[in-house]
Amino acid sequence: MLSASARRSAAGFTLLELLTVILIIGIIVSFAGLSVGVHGSRVVQDEAERLQGLIRIAGEEAILQGQELAVEFERQRYRFLILAPNGTWVPLENDNALRERSLPEALHTRLTVEGAEVRYDDPKNFPRVFILSSGELTPFVLTLNLEGEEEETYRLEGQINGKLELSRVQDDDEDSR
């Protein structure tokens, strides 16, 4: 004859144990779904927030180091430049934070510098936003959205005093422009 404890272990799992395991699996699956299923607007928001932070860092570096910096925009990438002693703008090297970055392919950008919309056509004169050691910044407005998803638009605005503002553009704001 089997003892009571031996019979209980041979009987299998209790309902409570099964429900606990199912609950844990459900929580893990939901977290995995949230981390994998990044919505398109999150991509736009992340890029806008990253660019805002990098320009802020560049502004602080320009002030602390007493050097003039710029961010140069191309259609699918941007990079930070430094004013060399010979008066030319050269890419900033050996700075992991302010390295050249590519934008996601589906991300559409529109840049206005000092009130004029710029074009990315001339490879010798890509548009630049200057970040000065005095704390000043070239006034600009950069809008970012995924192609075909204008309702998920973010607007990064830089003011001459170095202040940066990031906002999500509502549909009616975009229509009124």
Image (tube, grey):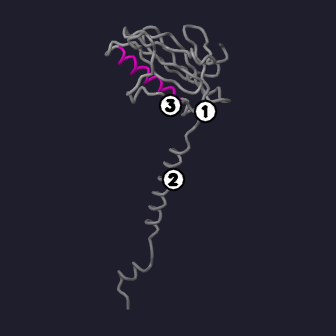
The stretch drawn in magenta includes residue 93: no
33 versus 66 height, above or below: below
Q: Position of residue 22 (x, y in %)?
A: 49, 60
Q: Which of pointers 2 and 3 lies earlier in the amino acid sequence? A: 2
Q: Are marks 1 and 3 in contact (CB under 8 Å)?
A: no
157 versus 33 height, above or below: above
Q: Main secondary structure of the magenta part?
A: helix
Q: Are marks 2 and 3 in contact (CB under 8 Å)?
A: no
Query: Residue 60 is drawn in which quadrant?
Result: top left
* Image quadrant occupied by the C terminus: top right
CA gap between label 2 and label 3 equals: 24 Å
Q: Nearer the viewer, residue 141 or 122?
A: 122
Q: Position of residue 63 (x, y in %)?
A: 34, 13
Question: Within 10 Å of the Cα at label 1, are there few (<14), some (14-19), or many (20+) other Cα atoms?
Answer: few
Q: Position of residue 49 (x, y in %)?
A: 48, 26
Q: Nearer the viewer, residue 71 or 121?
A: 121
Residue 88: mark in rendering? none
Which residue is disc 2 drawn over?
A: 29
Residue extending farthest front: 86
19 versus 29 height, above or below: below
Residue plotted at (46% across, 8% down): 160
Side of 17 where 124 appears, left or right: right
Residue plotted at (59% across, 19% down): 123
Which residue is disc 1 drawn over?
A: 105
- SS for dot 2: helix
Amino acid at pointer 2: Val
Amino acid at pointer 1: Glu
Query: Residue 91 is drawn in which quadrant?
Result: top left
Which residue is disc 3 drawn over?
A: 46
